[in-house]
Amino acid sequence: CLSLFFFGTITGNLDFVTYVNNRMVSVRNEKCDVDNKLLEDGEVWYRTDFCEKIYCKLVDDFGLTEVKGCVPITPVPPNCTIVGRRGTYPDCCVGEVVCNLPSEPQSDQDILEEIQLLLAKRARK
């Protein structure tokens, strides 16, 4: 059975998995160069674009970083966003997924056009 039409918004809690990643980075001006962000020896950077905490340690001529972060266990679909992620790592390792679904067809013509689109997609496979 194939359901063709949905409307509204779907929300649900997300589960997150944490990770730790140690990596060597280049040193510039006696600082760890992490994605063009320069960190002093022993400095911690809390990224907000990714839910991560990055620690810099200078060792001889290279930098060693410890990256701790988290990501949703399941991929977030393109029509969905994560809401409720606030703060820095590890506080940002919580959230809900909100998905906007297409509007309900308003007329028989809308339904016919949707069916034609689905049939055309199926014919291309």
Image: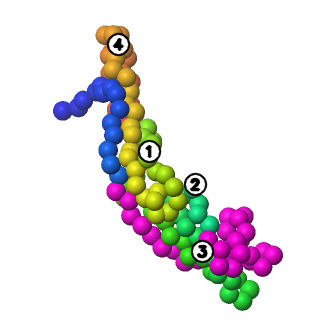
SS for dot 1: strand
2 lies above or below 87: above
Name which of mark 3 and mark 1 comes first in the sequence: 3
Pick whichever, 120 or 79, lies toward us. 79
Residue identifier under label 1: 83
Does the magenta run of residues contain 60?
A: no
- Which disc is residue 55 wearing? 3
Image quarter where the C terminus lies is top left
| Label pair 2/3, CB-CB below 8 angstroms | no
Name which of mark 2 and mark 4 comes first in the sequence: 2
> Residue 27, position in %: x, y?
74, 77
- Disc 1 crowd rating (10 Å Cα; few below 14, some 14-19, many 20+) is some
**Looking at numbered disc 4 in the image, what kind of residue is underneath it?**
Gln
> Residue 115, position in %: x, y?
32, 21
As measured in the structure, the alpha-carbon distance from the residue carrying label 2 to the one carrying label 3 is 16 Å
**Looking at numbered disc 1 in the image, what kind of residue is underneath it?**
Val
Quadrant of the image occupied by residue 47: bottom right
Image quarter where the N terminus lies is top left
